[in-house]
Image (cartoon, rainbow, N blue to C red):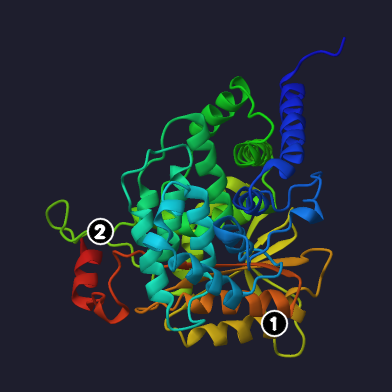
Amino acid sequence: MVPITAATILEDRISALTATVTDSWALASDTSIGFALAVLAGIAGLVPVPEMLRGDLAYGGIPAVARAGFQASSSGSFDPLLFLQAVDRIRGRPKNGRDQLVDDDIALLGIANGLSKCEGVDGAHDERKHWLLTIIAETGHAATWTQRARQLAGDLLDGAGRLRADPARNVNARTLDLVLRNEWPQAYGRTSLIGPDERREILAALLSSELPPDGELERSAVWLVAFRLLVQKMATDLVPDYDTLVEALKATQSALRRWVWDEKPNRQDIGPARWVIDDESHVQSFLWAILEPRFGDQLYDEQYLPGFGQKQPRFDFGLANLKTIVEVKIARTHRDFPKIEEEVAGDLGLYFSEPERYDRMVVYVYDDSDRPHPEQYDTLRSALTQRDRRIVDVIIVQRPGKMPNRNARQPWIKSLAAKGKGK
């Protein structure tokens, strides 16, 4: 008899869910298939969708449009003009297609995702956004376990912060939230993170609850992804890996919600506490405080690399066990982004002159612009990662909203500094 262990229980559940997903393709709508393909991207061992189940955007109605919207996030073929034409056909239906869409949270998410990728394609983007946001805001429908997808759909279009509200407490809703934040991390950038206790609760609920039956592609796909994410998180908590590094760096955007910038002093004879980040070295110190407790003696602070001629570059952080360099940059205006690209690209040969020590890089950019231009983020990310495959990730965060504009920050007064030294 094979002994039953926690590992075998997990393995059995993952195998059963994989089989359910595989058996459900032929029973699912285009909406469900598009959603499942989006969240399952990168999951190994799944049978591909049969060719006969490919959606037809020209004639397939709302499900085909939703599926195409989900495809906008992948590297596959997505035709913005064809997608927008299909959306406009739905808008031309009686009641603007409300009756067919109002109760389908997953379809709303698919269409919202597609629209969010089509800004600037033509002059009707705001009209389409308003149309879909009106349907998303409808309150007459019954809330289901997919309600979180509806909130995400709205935030993808207007960033109003619907996701800051906690998800429902049932296992399906919490599992969906876990999976959605993995696929759309930027939309969750200003929400609270899922802590270890809650992850354990979700895993326990998934292990003790009845599995979704064949045909429930959306729920079985969500459960399968959640199991894999939770197990991976447990493993990386024990041994920090590259994904742990990237996750920690990305999570700094959410961490900035609690940044200290007091309007008034908290006690007599001292100024208000204000944590100013005004220089690249300040960003480095912030990141050191984030990374050092997790990576310990594997984290190396500013190290010089072998140089050539008069040039001896140095990197900001190195993770010795991961053979990874973390290069930190600060952008003070949107005009700094092209400069950052050239600075990083110009030293690539020196950064990796010793490939046995370091063979990949993460670029971390702190955007201190008074008027952020987030449309430049993807441009910089693509430019650097396409320039050299060793640049694996480019992470860009915006400064805390509490921090004033650069020219509005309180100047340093020498007399006050001298008075402080004399005490």
Say how many tags the image has: 2
Image quarter of the N terminus: top right
Would you call the spot at circle 2 few (<14 residues within 10 Å), some (14-19), or many (20 or more)? few
| Residue at x 49%, y 77% (from the top left corner) | 375
- Residue 205, by quadrant, is top right
> Residue lying farthest right?
1
Considering only vertical position in the picture, is 262 above or below 278?
Answer: above
- Disc 2 designates what residue? 273
**Residue 278 in view here:** no
Q: Nearer the viewer, residue 363 or 417?
A: 363
In-image side of 423 versus 182 (left or right): left
SS assignment at label 2: loop
Considering only vertical position in the picture, is 296 above or below 264?
Answer: above
| Residue at x 76%, y 65% (from the top left corner) | 358
| Amino acid type for the residue under numbered disc 1 | Asp
- Residue 156, by quadrant, is bottom left
| Residue at x 75%, y 18% (from the top left corner) | 5
In-image side of 71 versus 114 (left or right): right
Position in image of residue 265 (x %, y %): 16, 57
Would you call the spot at circle 1 few (<14 residues within 10 Å), some (14-19), or many (20 or more)? some
**Residue 269 in view here:** yes
Position in image of residue 241 (x %, y %): 69, 49
In-image side of 289 versus 399 (left or right): right
- Disc 1 designates what residue? 347
Q: Nearer the viewer, residue 45 or 317?
A: 45
Q: Which mark is residue 256?
A: none
SS assignment at label 1: loop
In-image side of 199 versus 319 (left or right): left
Position in image of residue 223 (x %, y %): 62, 36
| Amino acid type for the residue under numbered disc 2 | Ala
